[in-house]
Amino acid sequence: MGAAALIDWAVAAHALPGETESGDLHFVKANEAGALVSVVDGLGHGGEAAVAARAAVAALDRFSDEAPLSLVARCHQALAGTRGVVMSVASFDRAGRTMTWLGVGNVEGVLLYSDPGSRRGRTTLVAPGGIVGSAMPRLRAEVISIVPGDLLIFASDGIRGGFAEDLPAEATPQQLADDILARSSKGTDDALALVVRYVGGARNSR
């Protein structure tokens, strides 16, 4: 899947066995400035977790042109009275060739560099504990320079740590997401993996 040729992305997910809906949701939206991606994990599982996650996704969609810090604050307001969520958000800036990301809670984020010989092989998102909707920590967004081929992975806490190890470099985002879910799902919670490859293409190519 694509978002205005700036990113290629895919998702793989399943609900906790026995549940009819998942509290783990993803959000991807392109605009003229770039693209916004997020993974949202409603606390717990089942219907109430899904309600909270859907409210967060709706807020992301409504205010998608705002910066990540502002977006998380919008979600916090929208989730009052719900179970709340943990979430991670990344915004890709077309002109600046940067990615800005931040998170609250344990949606893990990893950025794998396409040319690890010239930089560290990866960067891991450092997200403070808290709950969007009830217990917001002090937040700081991090801005990272990126190049075509760099790979962002967001994974909910239904995915075991270490999911980014030994991934095949030439695989598509869908193949990677499916592989992460198959190899690293705990099987005791909702689980979701979102894989985003930065392409950095021309503004109007798709």
Image: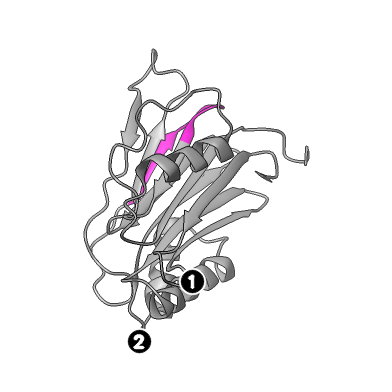
Relative height, residue 49 to residue 128 (above, below)? below
- Residue name at image x 58 percent, y 43 percent: 9
Say whether residue 49 is left or right of residue 175. left
Mark drawn on residue 21: 1
- Residue name at image x 43 percent, y 28 percent: 167
Relative height, residue 185 to residue 134 (above, below)? above
Quarter of the image with the N terminus is top right
Can you tell which of label 2 and label 1 is closer to the viewer?
Answer: 1
Q: Nearer the viewer, residue 83 or 80?
A: 83
Secondary structure at badge 1 equals loop
Relative height, residue 36 to residue 84 (above, below)? above
Residues marked 2 and 1 touching at CB (< 8 Å):
no
Q: Position of residue 67 (x, y in %)?
A: 47, 57
Say what amino acid the circle numbered 2 marks.
Gly
Q: Is residue 32 visible?
A: yes
Say what amino acid the circle numbered 1 marks.
Glu
Number of numbered discs on residues? 2
Say whether residue 143 is left or right of residue 175. left
- Residue at mark 2 to residue at mark 1: CA–CA distance: 20 Å
In magenta, the rendered stretch is: 141-151
Say whether residue 136 is left or right of residue 1. left
Q: Residue beneath label 2, please?
A: 81
Q: Nearer the viewer, residue 100 or 190?
A: 190
- Res. 149 image quadrant: top right
Q: Is residue 145 magenta?
A: yes
Q: Position of residue 194 (x, y in %)?
A: 49, 48
Secondary structure at badge 2 equals loop
